[in-house]
Amino acid sequence: MTTPAPPADDPRPLLTVVMPVYNGEAFLAEAIRHVLAQHYQPLEFIVVDDGSTDGTADIAAAFSDDIRSVRQPNQGPAAARNRGIEIARGEFLAFLDVDDLWADRVLHQLVDHLQAHPEVGIAQGMIQQMHLDRSVPETQPRTFTPVFQPYQFINIGSAVYRKTVFDTVGLFDPGFHLAEDIDWFIRAWEHNVPKAVLPEVVMFYRKHDRNMTLEQRNLVHFGLLKIYKRRINRGQARSAPLPTPAVPWIDYSGKAPG
C-alpha cells in the first residue's frame, strides 16, 4: 500500500513508522494493531520483514490495507531499519520493535513537540521496562509486569526523529546486530544533534526469553567495545579532532536501571 501525501491544509506532517521484524509471528499482529491504535494521521507504516522463516509474512499480508510490507534477506535489525528509512516518505520517523509497545497518543505528543521546537532533531520520552511474568502458564496470554522506575536511556523506539537527522548522522551501522542504537546515538551526540527529553513514559520495553539470554548480553558487551573502537577510528580518520559535544554523554544518553 502506498500512503497518499497529506493534503496541503493538514495540520500534521506525514509520519513514517518503521517496524523491523525477524520471526516475529508471536508479536506482529498485536504490534501492528497497537501502532494503528495510535490514530496518528497521516501515517505511513512500513514493516520490514528481515528474512523471516515463520509466519511473519502471512501475518503482514493480512494487514495489507494498513501497512506497507517489504521483505529482504536476513541482514539484521540495523539493515532492516535502514531499508525503511530509505523508502520512507515522512518528514518524521519513528521506530518500534515488534515486541515493544508505545503509550497512548505518543506519536501525537512527540511530533507536536518537534513542530513546536524546530531546533530540536529528536524528541524522546521515558522508558518503562517490563519483564515477562514467568508464573503465568504458557497456555495463558503473555503477561508483562513493570520493573524499575521509568528512565531515560538509549532505545530507538522511545523517540521520534526528523528524517533530516539521518542525513547528518548517517544510517544505522549494519555491522552491528546488537547495540546499533547506541552507536547511532553516539554519532548523533558527536554531531550535536539537539535532543529533547519529555518526562512522560512513552515506551514499554518488554523483556522476555528471546531478548534476555546470557549470549545476547555478552554480545552487547562486545558491541560496546566495537562502538568505542569505531569512535576512536572516526577521530583518527579526521584531519581535525571530533567536535566537542554540547552536553556530557551521560546527559544526552541517560542511564539504564540496574
Image: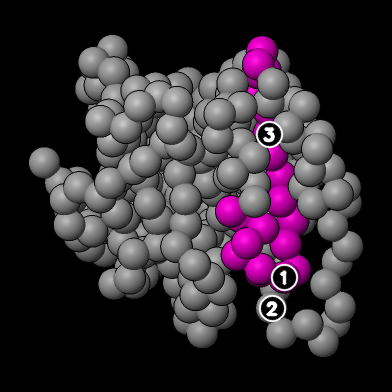
User: Is the C-beta separation of discs 2 and 1 under 8 Å?
Assistant: yes
> Magenta stretch?
34-54
Give the residue type that dot 1 points to: Gln
Question: In the rendered structure, which disc, 3 or 2, sits on the residue that comes first in sequence?
Answer: 2
Up-down relation of residue 241 to residue 217 (above or below) = below
* Colour mapping used in the image: one colour
Give the residue type that dot 3 points to: Val
Q: Secondary structure at mark 1?
A: loop
Q: Which mark is residue 208?
A: none
Residue on which disc 3 sits: 48
Residue on which disc 2 sits: 12
Looking at the image, which is closer to me, 50 or 84? Answer: 50
Q: Using a 10 Å C-alpha cutoff, classify the residue at mark 2 as few (fewer than 14 neighbours), some (14 to 19) or many (20 or more).
A: some
Q: Position of residue 234 (x, y in %)?
A: 36, 33
- 3D distance between C-alphas at marks 3 and 2: 25 Å
At x 79%, y 51%, the residue is 66
